[in-house]
Amino acid sequence: MSWWAKGLLIIGTFAIILLIALAAFPWGVLRETIEHRLSKRLGRPAQIAAMERADRFSFHPEVIARGITIPQPAWAGKGGLARVAQARLQFNALSLLTGKMSVEAFDVDGMTLTLIRDKNGRESWNDGDTSDGDGQRPQFSRLKIANSRVLYRDAKRGRSFDLKVEADVRRGLAMRGTGQLKGNPVTVSVDGGPIAGDAASKTWPFRAQIKGQAVGATFEGTMDRPLDVGHLTASATAYANDLALLDVIIEAGLPGTQPVKLAAKVRRDTPDWKIANLRGTIGRSDIAGNATIKKRDGRTRIDGEVTSRQFDFDDLASVAGKARGRAMEARFGDRLVPATAIDLKNVGKTDGKLRLTVGKLLWPGSSPFRSLRATLMLERSHLVMDPLELGLTRGRFAGRLSIDQRQGKSIASSPMLNIAMNVRDARLIDFFPHAQIDGRLEGKLRLAGRGRTIRGAIARSNGVVALVARDGKIPARTASLLGQDVGRGILTGKDEMASLRCIIARLDVRNGVMRTNPVLIDTTRALTKANGTITLNDERMALALTGAPKTRSILRLDGSVPILGTIKQPSIVVPKETKSVGNVVKMVGRAIAGKQGPTASDTDCHAMAANVLR
């Protein structure tokens, strides 16, 4: 024989011997080796009381292990993570040549698993692997479980379950038990088809349900293979008294809300999710949409769109949240600027893009804000809403809003809120219908401040607020009184109207204090100016109105009229000159003697409007 033939014969003979040895290997002799390696990997002593091979010769050997014990990590307290009376394992011996063991059948009797997660998120069953998973599919040809139990306690999410587990080749998988979600009792059931024979290589039907009075969810569909939780298609439904309570199940960082009902179609291909045909209600609001959720390098990216035919922002507050709001209102008074949280720490590892459209905004009272359209982009603790458009009864309030909580490579304790919005094609009467003052309205809002809530950020903000209303109308009585023309204010009929030439209002904001620069109302009857400040921290006003009529008056009030109180509850201080007959007589006397102040002239509304809106 030639040298290469001899070499080939030797290699072939060696391979045959190796295969025979592999097929006949007494796997029980590896008990201590497996114990040692498992203990080293887990950092705690694992034990296997006995292990033996059940068959004699096969490339698909069956190994029986008895008395398996794996303790909890030290931080989880005493007791076992896993205790198994007996486990029978069948695997493909040839797969070991590739470095991975392919499990084909698993029979277990007398198993108890106690899974613990602490408040910091440490998991007793996790050895520290934080990867997103490779989507490897299980290859079971048979699964049998008897006399087994799973206990789960999660201090971070406030949930716990106690489940009895059974599986056989005829009836399939069944898990039954009870649990709690944030103190709310629930029942749990999980069902799956049999795992044996041909069924082990086909799509696997399953149904999981959590049911309680306060919260519940169902998940029903098929996995690509039995127990292939990484690849599945399902229909999902959920309900809860509060979206935050539902979030205890799905862990998406959702806020507290009014009662919620949701339904959707989902597809998972580890580590990604696709959500389609989302439909549901939150309080009296409805939502619909779809989304794709991807996990890469420890971060989550969400891209999707949400639409709503009608939406009430009050539905985004839970019953407890509304109670806290009422308590704050009772303590601090009714505020214009909401105390909505804008802290992004809870979504520090979330990125994405969401397109939001609301056809009709619902408000508890009258409001000119009718619809909403926005694109939200979140990237590493920087949220941008651009474009952001609020449709008004007439016109629109549109621009850009950003919340930036970046601080170098870390996260700042408080985010920076930046608002740049413009009012276009609006009408003044839509904002103040009861005042019966109308005119074409435009304006701009430029504010930037740091805080954990919108109210907190505005209270520390810098910027400018400017509004201009032109070419409108105003009740003639109101116009005269604003000009401190008491005589015409009293004698003019309540239905008589005057022309509103313009309202010019510019408020410069520094460190949360607004200063008039200028604020004036120009009508065909009078000119009124306001001077002073508004403190945004408590929304208190310290303004003084001074007015002058455009023609001589019978009764004209001298001096200024203070406006105090808050933005939503102003208080006009009635001058003492109007409180007695004697003072009224003095005003008449000044009119007869010609000692009233000068009359006002028309303002250059066009030039002033251009200046404040620049």
Image: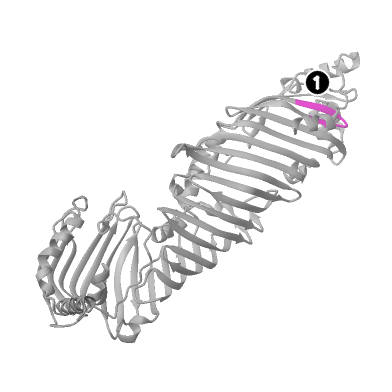
Q: Using residue 15 as the reference point, say whether residue 132 is left or right of it.
A: right
Q: Using residue 303 as the reference point, say whether residue 224 is left or right of it.
A: left
**Which picture quadrant has residue 457?**
top right
Identify which residue is drawn at 63% across, 29% down: 509
The residue furthest front is 2
Q: Is residue 432 shown to the viewer in this render?
A: no
Stretch in magenta: 521-529
Task: Choose between 613 and 243: the one closer to the eye.
Answer: 613
Residue 133 pos. (x, y %): 36, 62
For residue 274, above or below residue 468? below
| Quadrant in which the C terminus is drawn | top right
Identify which residue is drawn at 68% across, 29% down: 507
Task: Choose between 233 and 468: the one closer to the eye.
Answer: 233
Give the residue number, with chain letter if any, for mark 1: 584
Indicate yes or no whether the magenta region holds residue 526: yes
| Quadrant in which the N terminus is drawn | bottom left
